[in-house]
Amino acid sequence: MPKLYIVPTPIGNLQDITLRALEVLKMSDVILAEDTRQSSKLLQHYSIQKPMISFHQHNEHKNLNHIIQKLKAGETLALISDAGTPGISDPAFLLVRECIKENIEVECLPGATAFVPALINSGLPCERFCFEGFLPHKKGRNSRLLALKEETRTLIFYESPYRILKTLEQLIEVFGEERQASISRELTKLHEETARGTLKELLVHFTSKEIKGEFVIVVQGKS
């Protein structure tokens, strides 16, 4: 029976992949990769040689039918992203929905997701939280934040090094400079860092240093 596997990959440290994930990648007929060049590094590290098809947010609509046809033909496919679990701020939803529509089995393996260690490391309440992923770059960005102003659950955002300072300034404007928060960057990598404090303190901290890596921002909900 054809099947689509959703396979989480390490968010930094290549050792953070499960034995089962490696087994699935080795037995799949084709691997769908967000960036084939980036994924090649992981596959080479574990001596996995499989055909790859590029599958990312800019071509997922174009490639969808071709991939569905391969599954219908009886092939087993594995979907991976550059880092973490596909579908969490990465392509997967469209393909999974189409597979379900076509009665093609889908199985998602458990594995790495950046917001989980960042949330636990924050020291903020984590029994209930609101994951927002990346904020819109332009249109709708401020309205999204304003809609979260009264949210009492812990808030989680992803951000790039190019917009982290701007985002902190906007968070201060909407939530207030004294709101407690935590920012993790370079998770599982050599220069991993988690900084905690008020939003104002975190803005000062990251303004005074060279900004590198991908960021996870965890903000305390409204008291």
Image (tube, grey):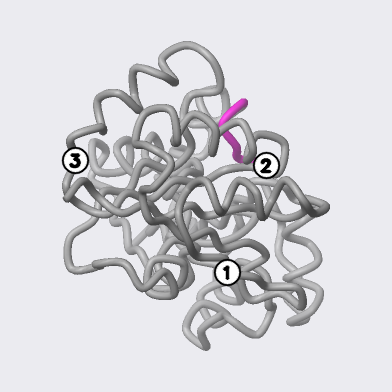
Residue at image position (57%, 65%) is 195
Residue 180, image x and y in percent? Answer: 38, 56
Q: Which is more N-terminal, label 1 or label 2?
A: 2
* Residue 51 vertical placement versus 42 (above, below): above
Q: Is disc 2 surrounded by few (<14), some (14 to 19) or many (20+) residues within 10 Å?
A: some
Under mark 3, the amino acid is Glu
Residue at image position (48%, 71%) is 112
Under mark 2, the amino acid is Ser
Asked whether the residues under the numbered discs 2 and 1 touch, taking CB atoms below 8 Å apart as contact, a structural biologist would say no
Q: Secondary structure at mark 2?
A: strand
CA gap, disc 3 and disc 1: 23 Å
Residue 170, image x and y in percent? Answer: 49, 29
Q: Which is more N-terminal, label 2 or label 3?
A: 2
Q: State the extent of the magenta-drawn residues as a range.
A: 54-58
Q: Which residue is mark 3?
A: 151
Under mark 1, the amino acid is Thr
Q: Is disc 1 surrounded by few (<14), some (14 to 19) or many (20+) residues within 10 Å?
A: some
Residue 159, image x and y in percent? Answer: 57, 43
Q: Nearer the viewer, mark 2 or mark 1?
A: 1
